[in-house]
């Protein structure tokens, strides 16, 4: 079954009508609470729909606590019930001490409706939140927790914010801000979370370099800036153009395991999507945590999947990361290791994992058997990936998702001076365009290692807003949320299931 997606475009008259409706609704709104009949609903802290977080970074080269990096996570199970199982959008307006007007820190965070909707006359909540099969992961987005200061001022125990839910994306117009102030902001507690998600590069195939002296004040650059609302009439507002796949699975990740994990999550999606009935595309192992453990016999070093029945353990086994002794140890991976792990596993998995492969980025047009990254130690089974662009683009990712292919990306984090401080790989399971603003939805594990608290679903705005260290100077690479983080590589996997004829 192909992913559910929709294309809805409206003319100028519809845009004007929508903006008028939004402004009129806000102008009449008083203290609207969750569960009301208005299509625009305020989400207060007494409803377990939104969680604010302060991120403590614990990367190999970056230790950053009590920072101004914030994250807001929305529970789609709660929001869907408030939105009556329709598509919804969350906007967050943050009040900082001494400010008279709020900062618009999160705009139009999409919360898609469940794939199934309640039937007429059904009274029980649906999907049933007690069902693991129906329950969806929180969706998160970074924001600047302390936008009035460059470096942050320490631990933030709580924030004052207005969180609004709407049935359509809000226009990024300054005319909305006075109306937003009609709502009484709520006090939200802020929890502290650890993030150590990394394990990709630097990579000579991308031209990235090992780190130099890292800027100690802004080692990850600046968090996403608040929205600058448009002055005057909105010229570019349209209903969203979106494609969504299922957001499962998202397996727990070991330290520095992001490269094989992103690929394992992607091929597991293909297994879930295409294996069944008359079609077979089958991974013989299970989507459970595991590692490609390094062992030795005398001077001979070898790898083994632990446990043997784990998809990620077997992908990691062929990736050949060094120093992997448990979930808390091990090196990262480069692009050659990415493809060796992916191709090696699919060949070993048997005859029902045939696929075609494409990528964007790298200095090699063809990667795989008989081409770049070939190796005599791993059977790549004739598999190759062909490049379809020198730089990753949103349009390519969107098109791959529309065609039911699995997609993963790898990105680099850079400090304020343009020095690469870490890299990370994640699965992309959705892409959306609202007006001219483009978003991707991703899956990864934010807290890697021996725990089960880090899996997450994130949203990023993507646009070339400038090369690291040179804001505003485009370099052809997509920045994530306008930060000095750049998408360096993307790959897609197209399953070729076998048709079983009775």
Image (spheres, rainbow, N blue to C red):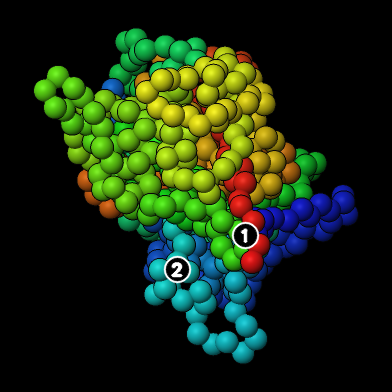
Residue 212 on image: x %, y %: 34, 10
Q: Residues within 10 Å of mark 2 (few under 14, many from 20)?
A: few
Q: Position of residue 223 (x, y in %)?
A: 44, 33
Relative to 8, residue 120 above or below: below
Q: Is residue 140 left or right of residue 8?
A: left
On residue 133, the disc is 2
Q: Position of residue 448 (x, y in %)?
A: 30, 41
Q: Secondary structure at mark 2?
A: loop
| Rendered position, 169 above or below 28 | above
Q: Which residue does the image show at 78% across and 55% down from the upper left?
A: 8
Question: Which quadrant: the N terminus?
Answer: bottom right
Q: Is residue 132 above or below residue 345?
A: below
Q: Position of residue 310 (x, y in %)?
A: 33, 49
Which callout, 1 or 2, points at the residue further toward the start of the chain?
2
Instruction: Look at the image and tell me in which quarter the C terminus lies.
Output: bottom right
Q: Which mark is residue 500?
A: 1
Give the alpha-carbon distance from disc 1 to disc 2, as whole Å.
28 Å
Nearer-the-camera pick, 31 or 203: 203
Nearer the camera: disc 1 or disc 2: 1
The local secondary structure at tag 1 comes to loop
Residue 390 visible somewhere in the drawing: yes
Query: Which residue does the image show at 45% across and 51% down from the upper left?
Result: 283
Of all residues shown, which one is farthest toward the bottom?
Answer: 121
- Tell which residue pokes out farthest to the front in this image: 502
450 left or right of 454? left
**Residue name at image x 35 percent, y 41 percent:** 314
């Amino acid at each position: 079954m192909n992913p559910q997606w929709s294309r809805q475009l409206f003319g100028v008259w519809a845009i004007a009508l929508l903006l008028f409706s939004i402004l009129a609704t806000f102008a009449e709104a008083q203290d609207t609470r969750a569960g009301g009949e208005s299509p625009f609903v305020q989400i207060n802290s007494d409803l377990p729909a939104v969680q604010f977080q302060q991120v403590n970074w614990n990367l190999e080269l970056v230790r950053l606590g009590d920072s101004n990096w914030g994250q807001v996570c929305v529970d789609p199970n709660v929001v869907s019930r408030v939105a009556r199982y329709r598509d919804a959008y969350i906007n967050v307006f943050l009040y900082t001490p001494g400010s008279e007007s709020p900062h618009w820190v999160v705009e139009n965070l999409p919360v898609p409706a469940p794939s199934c909707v309640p039937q007429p006359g059904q009274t029980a909540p649906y999907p049933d939140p007690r069902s693991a099969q129906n329950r969806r992961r929180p969706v998160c987005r970074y924001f600047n927790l302390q936008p009035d200061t460059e470096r942050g001022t320490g631990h933030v125990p709580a924030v004052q914010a207005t969180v609004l839910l709407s049935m359509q994306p809000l226009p990024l117009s300054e005319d909305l801000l006075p109306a937003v102030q009609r709502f009484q902001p709520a006090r939200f507690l802020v929890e502290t979370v650890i993030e150590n998600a990394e394990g990709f590069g630097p990579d000579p195939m991308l031209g990235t370099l090992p780190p130099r002296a890292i800027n100690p004040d802004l080692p990850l650059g600046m968090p996403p800036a608040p929205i600058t609302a448009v002055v005057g009439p909105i010229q570019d507002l349209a209903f969203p153009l979106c494609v969504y796949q299922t957001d499962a699975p998202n397996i727990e990740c070991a330290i520095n395991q992001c490269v094989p994990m992103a690929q394992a999550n992607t091929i597991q999606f293909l297994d879930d999507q295409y294996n069944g009935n008359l079609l077979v595309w089958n991974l013989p192992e299970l989507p459970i945590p595991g590692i490609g453990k390094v062992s030795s016999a005398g001077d001979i070093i070898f790898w083994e999947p632990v446990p043997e029945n784990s998809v990620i353990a077997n992908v990691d086994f062929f990736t050949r990361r060094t120093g992997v002794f448990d979930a808390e140890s091990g090196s990262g991976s480069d692009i050659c290791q990415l493809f060796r792990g992916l191709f090696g596993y699919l060949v070993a998995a048997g005859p029902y994992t045939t696929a075609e492969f494409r990528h964007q980025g790298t200095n090699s047009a063809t990667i795989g058997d008989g081409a770049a990254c070939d190796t005599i130690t791993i059977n790549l089974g004739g598999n190759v990936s062909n490049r379809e662009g020198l730089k990753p683009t949103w349009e390519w990712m969107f098109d791959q998702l529309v065609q039911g292919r699995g997609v993963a990306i790898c990105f680099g984090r850079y400090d304020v001076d343009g020095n690469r401080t870490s890299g990370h790989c994640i699965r992309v399971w959705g892409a959306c365009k609202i007006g001219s603003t483009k978003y991707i939805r991703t899956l990864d594990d934010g807290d890697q290692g021996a725990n089960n608290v880090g899996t997450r679903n994130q949203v990023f705005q993507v646009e070339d807003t400038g090369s690291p260290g040179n804001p505003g100077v485009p370099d052809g690479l997509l920045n994530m949320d306008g930060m000095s983080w750049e998408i360096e590589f993307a790959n897609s996997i197209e399953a070729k299931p076998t048709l079983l004829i009775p």
